[in-house]
Image (cartoon, rainbow, N blue to C red):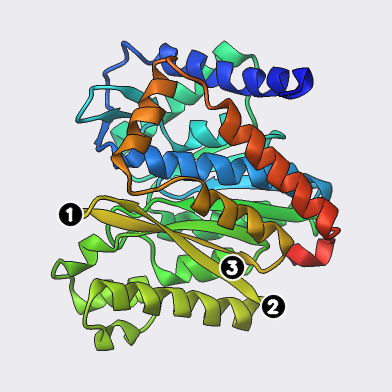
């Protein structure tokens, strides 16, 4: 490991540990989560790393949009560990700071806690991207967010994280995000789709009644992904990349879907998928070891950085790859 790489990784990991320690004694309004939530955050963090390594070379402004942002931290039910949530993961894993962040939370108490914790991190770190914390339903606020992003002009891009606990995000919201240049990581609640949802809720989530022909949760996932492809081609007039990582156990699992423009940098997502077993409990131990400072994930991030460089060297990435 070169001294330069070691220094860079250490600089990225130390703030994550430092920020986590801020909330060790902060038990107010913390969302309870299971161990598999850590894998979801790891996948997000690594794509943020890829995104903020490449996108700034081609776009003047690039934003992070979190439509179901939560309270800023989670508590792992099985271990009691306090872990920073998706908005702070996005900030701390970014290679280059986002131009701005849009964070939406429907629950008022969680929204208040999120704002307070963002400010606490800003005070601790000395800086933080310009952030708009919005209280309300993301399906009602999405037009406000995209209008604000569009106001920056043509050189814009956004990474949207949609952490569905159920059928939270309406298809109209997905369409609005596709209409601007964007990558999206969407949690599809695969196992939860076996619940008895109303036809109205399913129509809003899928955008139509295409779900009616499905005979299993796997078929529902396939239909949703195909709807993403069709909508992307219709709105963006380009070839989409749609790929998912299954996270969880045999009894409970969900799929993280990446939707973006097909191009050379999607190889980094394939690399992330193949790097670890996303359904292996041993992975959870590694993450908790990182959290408790027993081990630092140097090799993982350095290898990912190397993968990004190999992609760029093999095929020069052009602006058109993201349009």
Front residue of this view, candidates 146 and 40: 40
Q: Is residue 113 visible?
A: no
Which residue is at 58% across, 46% downward? 47
x and y percentages locating residue 293 in the rendered image: 44, 14
Q: Which residue is mark 1?
A: 251
Q: Which corner quadrant holds the C terminus? A: bottom right
x and y percentages locating residue 41 in the rendered image: 44, 40
For discs 2 and 1, the disc positioned in front in the rendered view:
1
User: Image check: 236 left or right of 193?
Assistant: right
Q: Which residue is mark 3?
A: 178
Q: What is the distance, in whole Å, between disc 3 and disc 2 at their CAs?
A: 11 Å
Q: Is residue 125 above or below residue 312?
A: above
Q: Which residue is mark 2?
A: 238
For discs 3 and 2, the disc positioned in front in the rendered view:
2
User: Image check: 291 left or right of 272?
Assistant: left
Q: Which corner quadrant holds the N terminus? A: top right
Front residue of this view, candidates 170 and 182: 182
Which residue is at 77% across, 65% downward? 321
Q: Is residue 95 above or below residue 154?
A: above
Which residue is at 56% across, 41% downward? 46
Q: Is residue 145 above or below residue 20?
A: below
User: Image check: 204 left or right of 301?
Assistant: left
């Amino acid at each position: 490991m070169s001294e330069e790489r070691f220094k860079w990784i250490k600089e990225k990991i130390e703030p994550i540990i430092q920020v986590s320690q801020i909330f060790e004694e902060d038990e107010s309004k913390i969302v309870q989560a299971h161990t598999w939530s850590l894998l979801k955050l790891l996948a997000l963090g690594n794509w943020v790393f890829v995104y903020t390594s490449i996108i700034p070379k081609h776009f003047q402004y690039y934003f992070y949009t979190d439509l179901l942002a939560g309270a800023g931290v989670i508590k792992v039910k099985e271990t009691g560990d306090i872990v920073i949530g998706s908005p702070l993961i996005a900030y701390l894993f970014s290679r280059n700071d986002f131009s701005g962040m849009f964070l939406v939370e429907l629950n008022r108490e969680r929204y208040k806690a999120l704002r307070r914790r963002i400010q606490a991190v800003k005070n601790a770190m000395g800086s933080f991207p310009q952030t708009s914390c919005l209280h309300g339903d993301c399906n009602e606020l999405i037009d406000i967010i995209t209008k604000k992003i569009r106001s920056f002009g043509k050189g814009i891009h956004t990474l949207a994280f949609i952490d569905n606990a159920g059928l939270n995000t309406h298809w109209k919201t997905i369409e609005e995000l596709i209409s601007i240049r964007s990558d999206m990581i969407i949690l599809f609640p695969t196992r939860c789709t076996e619940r008895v949802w109303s036809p109205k809720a399913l129509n809003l989530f899928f955008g139509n009644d295409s779900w009616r022909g499905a005979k299993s949760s796997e078929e529902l996932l396939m239909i949703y992904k195909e709807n993403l492809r069709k909508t992307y081609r219709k709105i963006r007039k380009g070839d989409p990349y749609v790929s998912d990582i299954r996270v969880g156990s045999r009894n409970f699992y969900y799929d993280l879907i990446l939707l973006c423009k097909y191009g050379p940098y999607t190889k980094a997502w394939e690399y992330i998928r193949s790097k670890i077993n996303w359904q292996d409990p041993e992975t959870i131990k590694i993450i908790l070891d990182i959290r408790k400072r027993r081990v630092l994930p140097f090799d993982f991030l350095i290898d990912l950085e190397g993968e990004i460089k190999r992609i760029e060297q093999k095929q020069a990435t052009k602006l058109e790859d993201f349009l």
